[in-house]
Amino acid sequence: MAESIDESSCILCGRPSAPPRETFSVDELTEDWRRSFAVDVRPEFANITMVSLYHCSFCDLDFFIPAVTGSSEFYGELAKFPWYYMSDKWEFSMAEKDVPHRASLVEFGCGKGDFLKRVRSRKKADVLGVELGTPVVPESGERDIPMMRAGEGLTRRIRGVFPKGVDVVCAFQFLEHAANPRAFIEDVLSVLRPGGRLLISVPNDAGFLKDIRPTLHTPPHHVTRWSPRTLEAVAEQFALTLDHLAYEPLARYHRELWLAAYVARARSLGVSPLEQKFRMTMLSFFLKSHLIRRWIRGHTIYARYTV
C-alpha cells in the first residue's frame, strides 16, 4: 500500500529535503525479491513504476517516496521463514531491564508475542500487543497474550485498556516499516503517561548495512532507514529525554552479511582481489569467536526515551 507524502519535506522532522539520492525501478525491486525470497511483490506496488530514496540532512533519516508498505499477505509470506519472527532478540534483553516491575506495557509490531510473554512472566507487566498484519495473531492468541490489530481508532482503543496511560511503549524493528514515523510517535506520546518510557530498536543504517543494502532493506519491507543521529533527532523533535543508546554486538547469524559488507567496502577502496581473499580468510576465522564479535557493532541500535 502506498501512502501519499509531501516530497518537499522530511517525514520525521519536517525540514526541507534534498533531491532523491537514488531511484529504483519497481521491476528491479520485484526481481530482487523474487530472486532472494521467491516472493512476488509486484502487486504491492499497484500502478507505481518507480520509487525514490530521499535523505534529510538534519535528522539523517533516509525515506522512500512513494512509501509502499507491505500488505498482510506480504508479511504472511515472510512469516513462513523461521528466522523472520525470532523468539529471542538482543534488544529483548536490553528492554527487559528498562521495564519497571508491574508496568503497563504496549508493544507495536509484537509478532508472536514473545517479548510480551517474557515481561509478563518476569516483570509482572500488564501487557498489550499491537500487530499490523494478521498471520501471527492466532498463534499469539494461543499464548493468551492480549492483542489488537492496528487501524482506525487505535489510540482510543489503547486508552480504553489503559485509561490512566501506559508506562512503557515498545517498538522493536518496527519504525523502519512505518510510512509516517512522525504520526506514529505522536500517537505513542498520546497514550504514554508523563514519565513513561519509549523503547525503540531499528536496524543501524550507519553500520555494515550501508555497504550492502540487502533486499529486506527496501520496499515494500523497509521504507525508512535510521542511524544513531536519527534517534537523537527523535528526542529533539518530540521533546523527549534520550536516556540510553546502545549498539548490538555482531551476532553469529550476521557474520556473512558483515563480511559481504567488508568486501564491498574493500572493493570500493581499490583493494586487490588477492588481498580481499586473504583478509576474508582471516576475518572469517576470527569472527567465529563471540569474544571478538562483541567488540564489533552489529545490526541493531536500541534507544530508551523518557517522556
Image (cartoon, grey):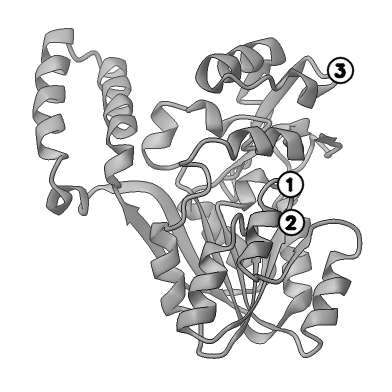
Asked whether the residues under the numbered discs 2 and 3 touch, taking CB atoms below 8 Å apart as contact, a structural biologist would say no
Q: Earlier in the sequence, mark 2 or mark 3?
A: 3
Q: Residue at x 80, y 74 (%)?
A: 158
Q: Nearer the viewer, mark 2 or mark 3?
A: 3
State the image coordinates of residue 26 (x, y, percent, origin top left). 71, 16
Mark 3 and mark 1: span between their CA atoms? Answer: 23 Å
Q: Secondary structure at mark 2?
A: helix
Q: Nearer the viewer, residue 296 or 132?
A: 132
Asked whether the residues under the numbered discs 1 and 2 touch, taking CB atoms below 8 Å apart as contact, a structural biologist would say yes
Q: Amino acid at mark 1?
A: Ile
Residue 265 located left or right of residue 61:
left
State the image coordinates of residue 28 (x, y, percent, origin top left). 63, 12
Identify the residue under disc 1.
11
Q: Earlier in the sequence, mark 3 or mark 1?
A: 1
Q: Quadrant of residue 66?
A: top right
Mark 2 and mark 3: span between their CA atoms? Answer: 26 Å
Location of residue 49 with respect to 230 vertically, above or below: above
One can see residue 248 in this view: yes
Q: Residue at x 53, y 48 (%)?
A: 85
Residue 229 located left or right of residue 113:
left
Q: Quadrant of residue 48?
A: top right
Q: Which mark is residue 182?
A: 2
Q: Residue at x 38, y 59 (%)?
A: 90
Q: Amino acid at mark 3?
A: Asn
Identify the residue under disc 3.
47
Q: Which mark is residue 37?
A: none
